[in-house]
Image (tube, rainbow, N blue to C red):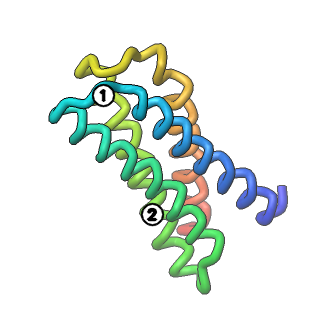
Amino acid sequence: MKQEDFNEIFRDRTKILALQIITLLGKLKHSDALGVIRKQLIRSVTATAANFRAVCRARSERERFAKLCIVVEEADETLFWIEMITEAGFISKEKMTESYKEAEEILKVMASYRKKLKG
């Protein structure tokens, strides 16, 4: 697969995941505890998407690697916040299963990509 194709696929996948999570969380009733988790989850999932876009536009290999490290960190944090929101009982695991699996797959691919760049 060409790099341009990979970049386009994952720009779309990360953005779609962010929109799915924003939509799911927007339907939940407000509470202070939920508000904290919701904010953190939305922040991490959108940061994953935004930083992957920055990876695609990096001006050097060092910049690409640095941004990719942020993508991996934010994707992992997204998984953490999905676990928190479901384990706290704010939303069922079933409703978050698809998003969790997609975030997990994105994390695995990005961690592998980071390892390749570090190589």
- Residue 50, relative to residue 19: is it above or below? below
For residue 27, side relative to residue 108 (left or right): left
> SS at mark 2?
helix
In primary-sequence order, the first of circles 1 and 2 is 2
What mark, if any, has residue 38 been given in the picture? none
> Does residue 104 appear in the picture of this structure?
no
> Does residue 82 appear in the picture of this structure?
yes
> Crowdedness of circle 1 by 10 Å Cα count: few (<14), some, many (20+)?
many
What mark, if any, has residue 69 been given in the picture? 2
**Nearer to the camera, 71 or 34:** 34
Q: Which of marks 1 and 2 is in front?
A: 1
Which x, y percent locates residue 63? Answer: 52, 80
> SS at mark 1?
helix
Q: What kind of residue is marked 1?
A: Ile
For residue 99, side relative to residue 26 (left or right): right
User: Mark 1 — residue?
Assistant: 85
Which x, y percent locates residue 50? Answer: 52, 62
Who's the residue at 79% across and 65% down the image? 4
| Residue placed furthest toward the bottom | 59
- Residue 10, relative to residue 60: is it above or below? above
Gap in angstroms between the C-alphas marked 1 and 2:
25 Å
- Residue 9, relative to residue 95: is it above or below? below
Which x, y percent locates residue 18? Answer: 52, 45
Q: Quadrant of the C terminus?
A: bottom right
Who's the residue at 42% across and 27% down the image? 27
